[in-house]
Amino acid sequence: MESPSFTLIIPAAGIGRRMGSDTPKPYLMLKGKSVLEHTLSCFQDLDSLKQVIVSTSVSYHDQTSEILNRLFDEVETAVVEGGERRQDSIYNAFQKVSPSIQYVAVHDAVRPFIRAGRITECLNVTAETGAAIVGVPVKDTIKRVDAENIIKQTPDRSELWQAQTPQIFRKDLYGRAYNYAKDHDVEVTDDASLFEAAGIDVRIVEGDRENLKLTYPVDFRIAEMLVDSINP
């Protein structure tokens, strides 16, 4: 089955505070290439990819444009200014999505190990259902605590999943979810939550634990080992 065409949005305007660096995490170097370049490369050979839009700070606009032009010579690309919040950065990019595109994928700039097969699987599920994300079942016991760190509840682990990206949506539903968020002042940490708030069902596709998000220095050390295992 031929996968439908899609636009990729990468929010890359975040800072590297938890990584302990003045350089934003997407622009940290990982084995000779920026994390952003590693991430974009995961999508490079997908025939269904027709457009790539990266939202980032003004000071990294030129560097980002250079990476996009080098990696995607036959795909439409654009760089837009990031917003104050992640969802603002994505919304800015969403305004640039080509009218001919039906599906939009959002992927974290600092998840450089997503497999092409998982992207395609998530895209195909989205074509069937309208909204799908990649995730993995939670492996640890989770505790809900109060403001004083007193445990209040232990949720059933069998019902819990860790959300990852890409998160892929039909474009018209995406616009509806964002309009709902604006009208009701909804603030979220991932796009699937926008859909949940708007009452739109989202399917989850099981992914891989290697698809980690580089947030802390230990994540970066793991990433270096993963790069070495991919390119021995």
Image: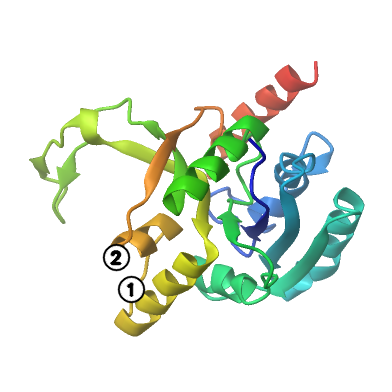
Give me the C-alpha separation between circle 1 and circle 2: 8 Å
> Is 182 placed above or below 108 here?
below
At horizontal 82% and vertical 41% (from top left) the residue drawn is: 33
* Left-right relation of 170 to 61: left
At horizontal 79% and vertical 69% (from top left) the residue drawn is: 61
Decide: marks 1, 2 in contact (CB < 8 A)? yes
Q: Position of residue 103 (x, y in %)?
A: 58, 58
Mark 1 sits on what residue?
186
* Image quarter of the N terminus: top right
User: Which numbered mark, 1 or 2, is in the foreground of this view?
Assistant: 2
Q: Position of residue 154 (x, y in %)?
A: 13, 35
* Picture disc at residue 33: none
Question: In what element is the residue under mark 1?
Answer: loop
Q: Residue furthest bottom?
A: 183
Mark 2 sits on what residue?
197
Q: Is residue 187 visible?
A: yes
At horizontal 22% and vertical 30% (from top left) the residue drawn is: 157
Asked which quadrant contains residue 30, the reply is top right
